[in-house]
Image (cartoon, rainbow, N blue to C red):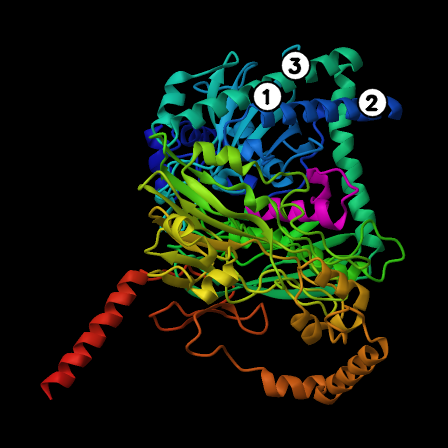
Amino acid sequence: MSEHLNRAASGASLNSEEQRLLDEFLNENRLFYAPDPDIMRNHKLAPRSATEQRVLGGVLDDNIINLVRGRFNSALDEVFTMVEQTGVAPGAKWGDLVSALFTASGDLTQMGPHGIVGFAAVSHYPVQFVRKYWMHDASVGVRDGDAFIHNDARYGNIHNTDQSMIMPVFHDGELVCWIASTIHEGENGAIEPGGMPAIAESKFDEGLKMCPFKCAENFELKRDLVTFLQNSVRDPKLQFFDMKVKLQACVRLRERMLAIIEEFGCDYVVATLRRTLEDTEAEVKRRIEEMPDGVCRINTYLDTSLREHVLAKWPIAITVEGERMSFDFRGACPELRNRSINAALGSLKASLLSNVVLYIWPDLPANQGAFSPIDIVTNRNSLLDPSDDAPNAMSLLPLFRALSTPSLVMAKFLYCMPRRYTAINASHYNQPATFVYGGLTQHIEVTGNFCADINGNGAGGREDNDGEHAMSPTFGSFADTGEFELAEEELPFVRLVAQKLTVDRMGFGKYRGGLGYEQIVTVKGSNQFGFMTGQCGAKHPSAYGLFGGYACPAYPLAKIKDVNVFDTMRDAPERIQFSMVDLMNEQAIPGGRYVMQDAGMPFEICAEGEVYMICQGAGGGYGDVLERDPALVMQDIEDAILTPAVARDIYAVVFDEQTRLVDVAATAAQRAALRKARIARGAPFDDFCARWVTPGPDPALPYFGAWGDNTGPILAHAPGAAPISMPADAVQGVMLSNPKDRRIAELEAEVAALRARATH
C-alpha cells in the first residue's frame, strides 16, 4: 500500500486496481466524518430503490393506500400526544416537537398532524448520514433496536437546542423505513444557559454538537453515553428523561408500523411511503406550472447581531419558469464569523419548506416532495449559507424570516390566480420574542431553557379578514403558550404581565395584522438567575405588510434596574401601571435606572425585583389603510387595542369620541383629500429613483450585503472597521470586534481628550 501511496503522491497515474486499493485505504482511515455536502446541499427526492420500483410497478389498490396513510397518521398523532404528555422540556409540554416517518432512503414522507414541520423537515439529513456512513461501518452498524441521536444543525437541524431520536424499522431482516421523534430541549451546555447563546463567537461556545451517533441498542439507552451528555449540560435530569421519552416514542411508533405491515403487508407500506412523496411532488409541479412565469422579490433586513446594531440584508427573489421554481438569496449579508446568527443551509431549507406547507399550500401533505421541485440559489459563505465553522446557535433570527417571507413574495404570483389554495395574507410575525432564562432556581437546581411566549405570534392581515391575535408560532400551526403558574412553581421568575394584548402596536391596513402581547417578568427567590433575548426588530420592522399594508412596529426591549418592584407593590401599589409604555414613560418606581435597548440581549443576572419587558409582535397589515371599514376601526377602539388618536391619524376616521358614532360623510371627505395629497406627492419612477437611490450606503451605517443589484459586490462595514467589498462569487466571512473593546477604546479616547484639554 505504501508504494501505491507514494505513486499517488508523486502524481503518477494509477490503474483501476491501485485506485480501488487507495480509495479503500482512505475510506478506512478517514480522519473525521464532517458534514457531507453531498447530503447537506441536496433536498431532492432520492431515486426509487429497487424495492420501491418493484412495488410501484405492480397493481395497487388506491383505497388500501389511503387506509395505510390514515394508519400512519393515527400512529404519528398518538406518539405526538405521548411525548407532549410525558416530556420534561418546556418545549415538549407546549407542543414544540414532532414525530415523523422517512423512507428507507431517508426522505421525509409523513409527519404527525400536530407538531413543528421544520423539526421533521431537517431530520432526513441525519438519517441519510447514518445510512451512508454508519450502516456498513463494522464499529457502528444499523440493527433492529438501535437508536441514533443528534442535534448539530451542520448535520441537519433547525438549531442546536432541538434533539432528534432516530430509529430504523426492519421487517424480516429488511430495512423498511425510518422513524424519528424530535423535541426542542433548550438547555444544551452552551456558553449561556438555555441553549441559544447570543455571545457565542465560535461553534465551540454552542454546547452539545452531536453528529448522528448511536445512543441505544436493543431498545436500551447506553448509560455511558447518557452520562457523558448529562455531564455536558446544566440540566442532567432534562437530558436523561427526554432521551427516554424520545426513545419510547420511537419504540411505540415502530410497534405501530409493524402492526400496519402485519395488517396490509410490507409492499403497501413501502408503496404508500413513496407514493405520498411522488404524488406531492407532482402536484407542486402542476401548481407551479399554472402560475405566471416571472420574478418577484423583496429585500428585508436584520437590525442586530445580538451584540451590536447592524443592518444585515436578507433578500429573496422567487422565479417561476414552467414547472420549476427557484428561491434566490444572493446578495445576503456575508457570514459573520464570530456572531451566532448564521443559518446553516439545511436549516434554511427546512424553514422554507415549513412556509410552503403552512402558508402557501397548506392543503398539501407536509413532506419533502412539497419542496423538491424548488431550487435554492445562494452566495456561499453568506449568512444564509455559511461555512461549517461559523457559529449558528441563534440562527432563528434569519430562519424566522424564511418561515414567513416566501409567502409574502408568492402572494404577488398567486393574487391573480383564478384558483387559490388558501387566502392571501401578509407576513405572520416572525421573531422568537421570548425570554431565555437560566441559573439557580428557588429549589437549588441549576437549569436553563426558554419560555413558551414564542408560540403566540400575531398573524398577518388576510385578503378578506383581520389577522388573529397571538395565534400561533410562525413555524407551526399547533403549539401552546404554556401554563405560567406551573412554570413559576419550578422557576424563580414571576410574571408581572403575562400575555396582555398590546395597544396600537399592530400592522395597520385594510385588514390589520393580529396583535402580540407584552411580557413583563422579574425574579424572586434567587440571586443567581437571569434572562436573555434573541430577536431583532427594535429599529427595523421584521414582519412586512402586503399590498399597501403597514409592517409591524419596531419592538425594543425595556428594563428597570436597581429597583425591587415587590417593595413598591407592597408600599405604594398605586404607583404602578403594569404596561411597558406606562412603566417607561411614567418612571413611577423611584430610584430605578430605566433602560431602552436593542431587542436582542445577551444573558445577564436579574436581581430580585428588577423588571424586564419585551413585546410579542404583530402580523403585517393587508391593503390600504384608507380602505378599512370605519366599523372595524371603531370595533378595535371598543376592544381597547386601538386608541382614538391613532384611529384618526392612521385610518382617517371622523367620529364622536363620546358616542363612538362615525361621521360617514366627513370620513369619506377626509380620505378623499388624503388620496389627492398622495397623488400630489407622487413622482414618476425614474424621478423617484434619482432623488432616493444612492450609489452606496451611508458611510456611517454598519451595512452588510449587496447594494442595489443582488448579484453585485457584497459590502461589509463592521463597526469600528473600514468598509470592504467582495465579489459575489468570492464572499469571505467577516469578523466583528468585541463591543466592550470598542466601548473601552471610545472611553479611552475621551479620557485622552480631557487630559489634553486639562494640560492646556
Q: Disc 1 marks which residue?
A: 249
Q: CA distance from mark 3 to mark 2?
A: 17 Å
Say which of 251 and 135 sits in front: 251
Q: Earlier in the sequence, mark 1 or mark 2?
A: 2
Magenta span: chief secondary structure: helix
The residue shown at (12%, 84%) is 758
- Measured as percent of width and height from the top left, residue 296 is found at 71, 65
Q: Disc 3 marks which residue?
A: 255
Q: Disc 2 marks which residue?
A: 67
Q: CA distance from mark 1 to mark 2?
A: 22 Å
Queried whether the magenta region covers residue 647, the answer comes back as no
Q: Earlier in the sequence, mark 3 or mark 1?
A: 1
Above/below status of 202 relative to 77: below
Queried whether the magenta region covers residue 355, the answer comes back as yes
Quadrant of the drawing holding the C terminus: bottom left
What SS does tag 1 mark?
Answer: helix
Q: Relative to residue 15, is residue 753 drawn left or right? A: left
Above/below status of 58 relative to 286: above
Q: Amino acid at mark 1?
A: Ala
Q: Amino acid at mark 3?
A: Glu
Say which of 269 and 594 sits in front: 594
Dots 1 and 2: beta carbons under 8 Å?
no
Q: Which mark is residue 477?
A: none
What SS does tag 2 mark?
Answer: helix
Q: Relative to residue 40, is residue 597 drawn left or right? A: left
Instruction: Answer with the quarter of the image where residue 2 lies.
Output: top left
Circle nearer the viewer, 3 or 1: 1
What SS does tag 3 mark?
Answer: helix
Dots 3 and 1: beta carbons under 8 Å?
no
- Measured as percent of width and height from the top left, residue 353 is found at 66, 45
Above/below status of 242 relative to 400: above
The residue shown at (67%, 47%) is 471
